[in-house]
Amino acid sequence: MKIGELAKRSGCSVQTIRYYEKEGLISAPARTGGNFRVYDSPALDKLTFIKNCRTLGLTLDEIKQLIMLQDSPGRPCEKVNGMIDEHIGIVKSRIIDLQKLHDDLKVLRQKCGQARTIEQCGILDELSPKSSI
């Protein structure tokens, strides 16, 4: 299949596919006589794998490591488990940060509970520096 078809079937853009090729995440495809890229089913499978990893927030370097690990199916999977455990910690930390942001925004929103003029806006007043003169 040509790159446009691969893009459609994988849900990745043509530019993303070319980038993944450049980064070595997918192998360079065969080319037609007209110099068009021609991809096979394994390329689609690899793109689906990469897309699933990206959805989970894995970096390209981590994805490269996972692809290398896939090429050694007899090895133990502790490294994979460790990578996912790290991401669980990162997500947990982000959730805590987002919850604090949510709480701060709710408190800020209460500073201006009714329609007022901009001059009377409690939110803008709270966000503005206080003069120390």
Image: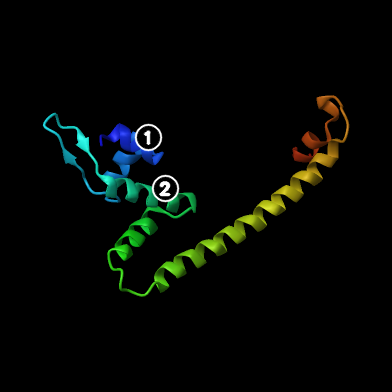
**Name of the residue lying farthest toward the left:** 33
Is 41 in front, or is 68?
A: 41
Amino acid at dot 2: Lys
Q: Earlier in the sequence, mark 1 or mark 2?
A: 1
Residue 123 locus on image (x, y percent): 79, 36
Residue 86 locus on image (x, y percent): 50, 65
Label for residue 51?
A: 2
Q: How many marks?
A: 2
Say which element carries label 2.
helix
Q: Where, by quadrant of the figure, is residue 112 drawn?
A: top right
Residue 115 locus on image (x, y percent): 87, 27
Amino acid at dot 1: Lys
Task: Measure how far apart labels 1 and 2 are at the Cα level.
Answer: 13 Å
Label for residue 77?
A: none
Residue 20 locus on image (x, y percent): 31, 45
**Name of the residue lying farthest toward the top:** 117
Categorize mark 1 by other alpha carbons within 10 Å: few (<14), some (14-19), many (20+). Answer: few
In the picture, the quarter occupied by the C terminus is top right
Label for residue 8?
A: 1
Residue 23 visible to an observer of this rendering: no
Is 5 in front, or is 58?
A: 5
At a point 83% along the width and 26% down the height, the residue shown is 119
Categorize mark 2 by other alpha carbons within 10 Å: few (<14), some (14-19), many (20+). Answer: some
At a point 31% along the width and 32% down the height, the residue shown is 4
Quick check: 93 above or below 101? Answer: below
Is 110 in front, or is 46?
A: 46
At a point 72% along the width and 48% down the height, the residue shown is 102
Say which element carries label 1.
helix
- Depth check, mark 1 against mark 2: the one in front is 1
In the picture, the quarter occupied by the N terminus is top left
